[in-house]
Image (cartoon, rainbow, N blue to C red):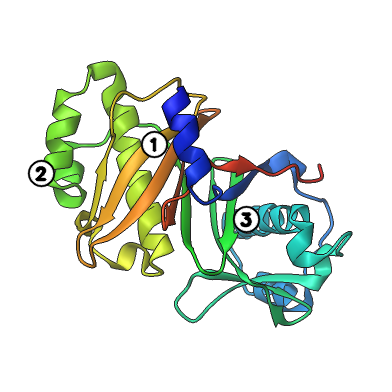
Amino acid sequence: MGRSERAQNRRERPGPWWLARGLEELPAGLDWLSSEEQRHLARLEVEKRRRDWLLGRWTAKSALRARSSWVGVDTDPADLTVRQAADGAPEALLRGRHLPLALSISHRSGWGLCALVPEAMLVGCDLEVVEARSPAFLEDYFTTEEQAALRAASVVERDRFATLFWATKESALKALRVGLRADTRRIRVALPGEPGAKEDWCRLAVQDTQSDLRFGGWSKMLAELAVVLVTSPPSGEPVELAGEP
């Protein structure tokens, strides 16, 4: 990152806090779940859904506990509840009290991801496997400008860029609390310049054309997965949390 970019980051509000957790870090027992979460888990019958749900909740609770200014020091994970609000978006409670934050959760291929921001902001995150997507998929879900950008990309980078575009659309729709019920083409994504190394954060320009709301987007690679975080208002580079193992 150059000097001008670092200066710009200092002028922006702090970036979203984020944490990723692997499936191997999931506790063996269930005593870290709140009573409400245990009741929800009991209703999940498919083992993969149960595992993914648990990984997402463990990652979110690990992230929340790492932000002690919000939840207090040494908070028992069972005192935290991460549940779905009426619109399907996640919300966090401490002993039944809503926490003053917004969060987003994603899980894919044995990884969980959580992003946190103050409640005055919007946030969304997504994890996606980099893979080829058919022309029909691109036509159905991407704008004509995005399709043109993918055609102009090198063969080596095309699948990665398509995955980043898709993950960014999902993240923005999560932040808007509408999810994939909405048309993904309402979210316009652009790479403003050449992306950096895969392990570094890269900026994305994101706009909801329906409301004209603009997001700040960030992407990087985690193992074989594309990681995307978006916030509105736009924020600085994401800050990784040092959660407990």
Residue 104: mark in rendering? none
- Work out how far the residue at label 1 is from the one at label 3, CA to CA, in angstroms: 25 Å
10 Å crowding of disc 3: few (<14), some (14-19), many (20+): many
Q: Residue at x 47, y 24 (%)?
A: 3
Disc 2 marks which residue?
A: 144
In front: label 1 or label 3: 1
**Residue 52, how many percent across, how many down?**
60, 54
Residue 56: mark in rendering? 3
In front: label 2 or label 3: 2
- The three-letter amino acid code for the residue at tag 2 is Thr
**Residue 44, how many percent across, how many down?**
61, 68
On screen, 30 above or below 140?
Answer: below
- Work out how far the residue at label 1 is from the one at label 2, CA to CA, in angstroms: 21 Å
For the image shown, how many numbered marks are present on the structure?
3
Q: Residue at x 18, y 40 (%)?
A: 146
- The three-letter amino acid code for the residue at tag 3 is Gly
Q: Is residue 114 left or right of residue 95?
A: left
- Work out how far the residue at label 2 is from the one at label 3, CA to CA, in angstroms: 34 Å
10 Å crowding of disc 1: few (<14), some (14-19), many (20+): many
Q: Residue at x 45, y 22 (%)?
A: 2
Label 3 sits on a secondary structure element that is helix
Is tag 1's residue or tag 3's residue first in the polypeptide sequence? 3
Disc 1 marks which residue?
A: 203
On screen, 201 above or below 80?
Answer: above
- The three-letter amino acid code for the residue at tag 1 is Arg
Q: Is residue 127 left or right of residue 110?
A: left
Is tag 2's residue or tag 3's residue first in the polypeptide sequence? 3
